[in-house]
Amino acid sequence: MQTVRTVTFPDRDLLAKLQPLPAGIDAAVWDLKSDPDGVDLADIDGVILPYIDASAVLGSLSKAPNLKFVQTQSTGFDGVREAAGPAAAVASASGVHAAATAELAIGLIIAKLRGIDDAVRNQQTGSWLPQRRSSLADRRVLLVGIGGIGHEIAKRLAPFEVEITRVGSSAREDGEGRVHASSKLAELARTHDVLVAVTPLNDHTHKLVDATVLAALPDGALVVNVGRGPVVDTAALTAEVVSGRLHCALDVVDPEPLPADHPLWSAPNALITPHIGGNASAFEPRIVKLLAAQLKALANGEWPGNLVQAGPF
């Protein structure tokens, strides 16, 4: 196992929150937009990526020729392994965002089912338009993605008296019961009122929720995406939502950000939040706790957690 000693932080505030650092770990600040502060690029062993817009600066990782470890502050790690190269280990922040993202998923579902978005629009014009809406109780929810965030969503859905069908990459049984294969998604969609996508993005899940799956959903069904934008076929979803047949509540989109003239912005059946699932008060204490554990492991020559690419470890 190779030794990681010099780790860069994306900003001084995060570095301050991790003080004191474990013995044997040296720190520097590198936002990956300009030159690192206080260290030569050749001396950098590890890099902690920024939380916001990390994808925009991934190309800078190639400037550190002796890079051994990259830590994301996000659950997703799209493009990070490729940018870091096969010789570097890559770890995600899996678990850090689970509670906050699950909260948002439940909030989006309830807001859309109960017409809270319409009520906000009506408030702007002083319009009092009561009508009967769908409750979350008794809905059939198709949960696509059963990782950490999916597990937390399922836990929060359970008290609402819903019927949950879980979908993973393959059919199996686990401690929570049956998991259906994603290859059966279109078939399962026919009998569900709400589809929640929270799966990571990879070759298998790219446009997993496609035109066929969307067409199979019953009229009036709700599509929620709090995972990765490209998991849902945006063009196919837009056609269904603009037609009025389906509803959607999206925290992630493809492309992101959604262009200002995109028809989903003005579609009354759409509710959109700007990728804020994990960006809540729960984030800071949890990311600090995770980074502290990762730095301790590195200082002790141990395997860090959440590795999605082993590299030298």
Image (cartoon, rainbow, N blue to C red):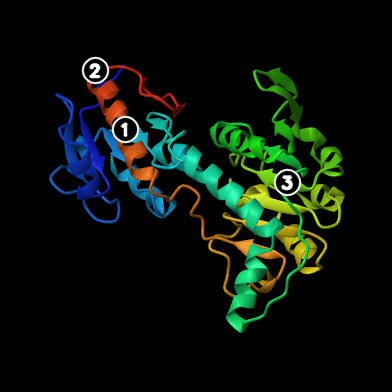
Q: Which residue is mark 1?
A: 289
Amino acid found under the numbered disc labelled 3: Leu
x, y percentage for residue 230?
63, 51
Residue count near mark 2 (Cα–Cα under 10 Å), binned few <14, some 14–19, many ≥20: some
Is residue 12 depicted above or below 116 in this figure?
Answer: above
* Mark 3 or mark 1: whose residue is earlier in sequence: 3
x, y percentage for residue 220?
81, 57
x, y percentage for residue 79?
49, 43
Residue at image coords 33%, 44%: 284
Instruction: Please say whether residue 136 is visible from this viewpoint.
Output: yes
Is residue 248 depicted above or below 277 in this figure?
Answer: below
Q: Which residue is mark 3?
A: 195
* Mark 3 or mark 2: whose residue is earlier in sequence: 3
Amino acid found under the numbered disc labelled 2: Asn
Left or right of residue 211: residue 61: left
Q: Residue furthest bottom?
A: 125
Q: Which residue is mark 2?
A: 300
